[in-house]
Image (cartoon, rainbow, N blue to C red):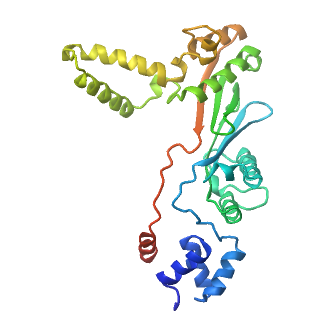
Amino acid sequence: MAGINAQAIKELRERTQAGMSDCKSALTEAEGDMDKAVEIILKKGLAKSAKKASAAATEGEVRASVSADKRRATMVEVNIQTDFAARNDSFRDFVGEVLAAAEKASAGAKLGEVTLASGKTIADAATELTGRIGEKIDARRWDVVEIPEGKHGAVAAYVHLGGKIGVIVAVETDTALVASHREVVKFLEETAMQAAAMSPVALRREDISDEDKAKQKEIFEGQLREDPKPKPEAAWPKIIEGKFNKWYSEAVLLEQESVEAASRGVSGQTIEKLRAEAEKAAGGSVTVTRFVRFERGEGIAKKEDDFAAEVAKMASA
């Protein structure tokens, strides 16, 4: 269609700061009329939606909730570009709406496709709010941990530093009475705080993949090669075994030394030992089944804004 080319898309984008695909759609709807396309963008609330597109949305908030029966915990991460905008009431309200919708969603659902109370999908609502606030908003991820039907147990959630880190922990028990015992509840809460503070990568050492263990072994071997006082290679297996045990004590949640116990002057208390103590006090089995840890913005890499590449991608579509 006449008037809909790379130059027209670029002009509309510069005038509205909307996304490439939104600009193309608006120009198509306006049959190439630039002023009408601008009006369409504004009416749809898409203006500014691509403002600062080269900046990664790494700020925002992690928020979690626990059901009244303490059998299901839900956690979401919603990102925005700046800390200042993250304190905007509209953004904070949106995070609450996302969490409320996630609480009712089925495990494994795509967060952007989950419907809010307003009837809009989370993805569509995020786009509209982006247009109003002027910063990119991304409902990035969510997870849910729940006690399976027919089993006993409890969950706990902890959010640290005003939404920077969130953790969910679950235990299964042999009776509901054990699950509600004060020592088990205390253990759950302290374990959630432990995971927030100490960044474990796995619940048990058996949960670490062979691939990750192989990579760690390569690191240990590299350290031995670079040692200014090299050890005989025949001694390496035993040394590497010791290095692995130390690594497990830092990377595996149940093997970590309790931060809370250490703060009370009690050393050598691992999370596993505290679990055993809670189990004994409650008079029944207590098994940690899962934990989930979100740290705001982790793994997000900045992307460069490449107009030419975007045009080429659209042209080939």
Q: Residue 156 lies in what quarter of the image?
A: top right
Horizontal side of residue 27 vs 119, given as left or right: left
Residue at 67% x, 12% y: name it: 278
Q: Nearer the viewer, residue 168 or 267?
A: 267
Asked if residue 58 is positioned above or below residue 74 in the image, the reply reads below
Residue 37, given in percent of the width and then of the height, sits at 63, 83
Q: Residue at x 22, y 16 (%)?
A: 229
Residue 9 appearing in the image: yes
User: Which corner quadrant of the image does residue 283 belong to?
Assistant: top right
Residue 10 in the image: state x and y as whole percent: 51, 78
Give the x, y percent position of residue 175: 73, 18
- Number of numbered tags placed on the structure image: 0
Against 77, is 248 above or below? above
Judge left or right: residue 176 versus residue 20.
right
The location of residue 168, given as percent across then percent down, is 65, 32
Residue drawn at (32%, 29%) of the image: 219
Q: Residue furthest bottom?
A: 2
Residue 82 horizontal side relative to residue 239, left or right: right
Please tell me which residue lies in front, 98 or 205.
Answer: 98
